Image (spheres, helix red, strand yellow):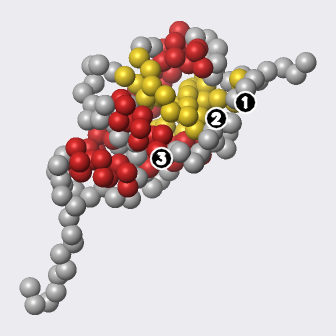
Amino acid sequence: MEKKKKGEDKNMGKVAIYPGSFDPITYGHIDIVERSLEIFDKVIIAIAENADKRSLFSVQERLQMVKTIFKDTPNVLADNFKGLLVDYVAKTNAKVILRGLRATSDFEYEFHMASMNRSLNTHLDTLFMMTSKDYFFVSSRTIKEVARLGGGVEGLVPDLVVRRLKEKFKLPVKKKKQISWDD
C-alpha cells in the first residue's frame, strides 16, 4: 500500500486551502492560485465570513465572482467558511494553507497566524508564496479605495471585478476624452 503524502486526499490529490476575504479578488490573488497549481493538484479558495470586517461585497457575491473567474479551471474550487480556519481545513482533508505575501510587512502578521494555526493543528503547514512583481503593490483595500474615488483599476483586477466595483459605487463607464493641441 502506497503511503499517503501530507496534504493529499485520495480523491483529490495534493490539496491546498487559499483562505482570505477576496473583497474583491485581484490579479495578485489569481497569480498565487495559478502558480500554486504547479505544486498542488487542487486549490480551494476559501472565502472567510468575518462579521467583524465590513466587506464591500457579500460572501455570495465574492463566491460568485471567484467561481466565474475560475470556471474553466476545474482544479480550483471556491467555497466559504465561518469560524476557525483550522476547523474548515480539517473538513477538507487538506494539510496545507496557502498564503500570498506582497512585502515584508505582510510576513509578521502571516507568521503569527501560521504559528497559531500550527499550534491548533500540528499536522497543518502554511506555504508562503511571494506575489508576482507586477502585483506586489495591489491589495483589495487599495483597489476598493481607488475604484470608489473613480480611478481606473483595469489591469489589476479581472473585467468582471471592474464592472462589479462600478456597479457598487454607482460609477458610469467613462469615455476617455481625446486631448488635442486645439484644446
N-terminal-most mark, 2 or 3: 2
**Which residue is under mark 1?**
13
The residue at the point 21 percent across, 72 percent down is: 176
Where disc 1 sits, the SS reads: strand
Q: Amino acid at mark 3?
A: Ile
* Label 3 environment density (alpha carbons within 10 Å; few <14, some 14–19, many ≥20): some
Q: Which residue is mark 2?
A: 42
Indicate the position of residue 56 as horizontal and vertical percent values: 26, 35
> In the rendered structure, which disc, 1 or 3, sits on the residue that comes first in sequence?
1
The answer to whether 5 is drawn above or below residue 156 in the figure is above
**In the drawing, does residue 174 fall left or right of residue 41?**
left
Q: Residue furthest left?
A: 183
Which disc, if any, is residue 128?
A: none
Labels 1 and 3 touching (C-beta < 8 A): no
Q: What's the amino acid at mark 1?
A: Gly
* Residue 170 horizontal side relative to residue 84, left or right: left
Q: Identity of the amino acid at label 2?
A: Lys
Evaluate if marks 2 and 1 touch, with contact meaning CB atoms under 8 Å apart.
yes
Q: Quadrant of residue 8?
A: top right
Provide the residue designation for mark 3. Answer: 69
Distance from Cα at disc 2 to Cα at disc 1: 7 Å
User: What secondary structure is found at the residue carrying circle 3?
Assistant: helix
Residues under labels 2 and 3: Cα distance? Answer: 16 Å
